Amino acid sequence: MRDSLTARPRLFPLVLAATIAASPALAEYRTKDVPAVTGLDPAGIAPNTIAFTDHRDNPASPESGLVPFAEWGKRSPAQKALLAPHPAYVEPDYVQTVNGVAKPRHEALKVYVAEARFIVPRSADRIDLKRFATIPFLSRMDPAIKHKALNPSDAAPTKDPAAAFARRPDRPWCEAPDTTCIESRYDLEGKLPLGVKLANKLEDSAKKIAEFVSFQSELRVLPPDEAGKLVQLTKIEAPVAGAMEQNIFWVNQILRFGKFLAVMQPVATDPNKTVITAYMTLGIKADVLDRKKEYERVPVLRNLLPAQVLMGNSSFNTGTSISAGLPTYARNRIAAFADALAKE
């Protein structure tokens, strides 16, 4: 899984052609794995190259690249503050009713973080991020995921008391100025729906797995006061010229949150170029990753271990979207965004 798309040039155009259905041109950008993105000098990034890392130092381990939420906050406090759904976000606490008995529950999470950096051969003042903060653009980035507008009052954390743990403490979701509120659905592809059907036969009724992932998010260009704080993430000594994020605040299963964030800054040595630092963060329910024994005892499901599937190490993985595993999905999402910026 650590092979860079750079090492597979014949496959990459097919991947991006599927991801950017609306663009007749093949993708220009290729990903190149690096040990770290933070501190990487923009002047050292080759043209049409995305420096990428998701810290998967041991790909033989199914959970390589995942870090417990609490440890993430201690190890990378700036990331936790700016890449979690909001700075005050904590692991969920809620009441769960089992067999008629209500019990308090604390839910542990593990976090996947992908970081990328690339250069766009255009000055920052010539890039209008508002053109990309739209539902049609999201649909272009990954046609397998279907999106529609969501009334902010129907956001699950606002409407459903059972999802109250996902509310923001400072404001309701989707009620910031110039925000697009979105309901999205992704139907699992390939052999995964069959695997889910088989796995559900092993689970009790309270743990059924859906054959789709649905999620709600807000999409917006950040105002200058929020965007300016992102230098804490990029570690580039240049003013932030703009930033865009998709903040996933509710998911029907497997995940608790997700965020795609792109930060624009001018290249100090060339005002006609812009460096983009992009992030994709996903908070995964730890108990999902712990489901092993019931799968291991059924031969056909031994490759359906949740950690293997999520990290793209299973024979059930397929396609270029979420069913391919989080690392492939993150690479393709960032590459699609880079290609769109270059072709603006």
Image (cartoon, helix red, strand yellow):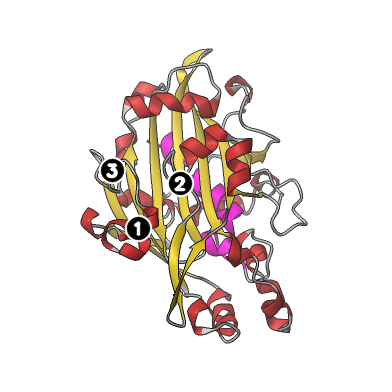
Q: Which residue is mark 1?
A: 164
Front-lying residue, 2 or 286: 286
The structure residue drawn at horizontal position 60% and vertical position 84%, both measured from the top left corner, is 202
Q: Which mark is residue 171?
A: 3
**Mark 2, secondary structure of its residue:** strand
Extreme-bottom residue of the structure: 201
Q: Which residue is mark 2?
A: 259
Q: CA distance from mark 3 to mark 1?
A: 13 Å
Q: Which mark is residue 87?
A: none
Question: Which quarter of the rendered picture does the C terminus lie within?
Answer: top left
Front-lying residue, 331 or 171: 171
**Mark 1, secondary structure of its residue:** helix
Residue 114 location (% of width, % of height)? 58, 44
Question: Which quarter of the rendered picture does the N terminus lie within?
Answer: bottom right
Q: Do callouts 2 and 1 mark residues in contact (Cβ within 8 Å)?
A: no
Say what amino acid the circle numbered 1 marks: Ala
Q: Earlier in the sequence, mark 3 or mark 1?
A: 1
Q: Earlier in the sequence, mark 2 or mark 1?
A: 1
Say what amino acid the circle numbered 2 marks: Lys
- In the image, is residue 124 above or below residue 257? above
The structure residue drawn at horizontal position 48% and vertical position 46%, both measured from the top left corner, is 336
What range is drawn magenta here? Answer: 317-344
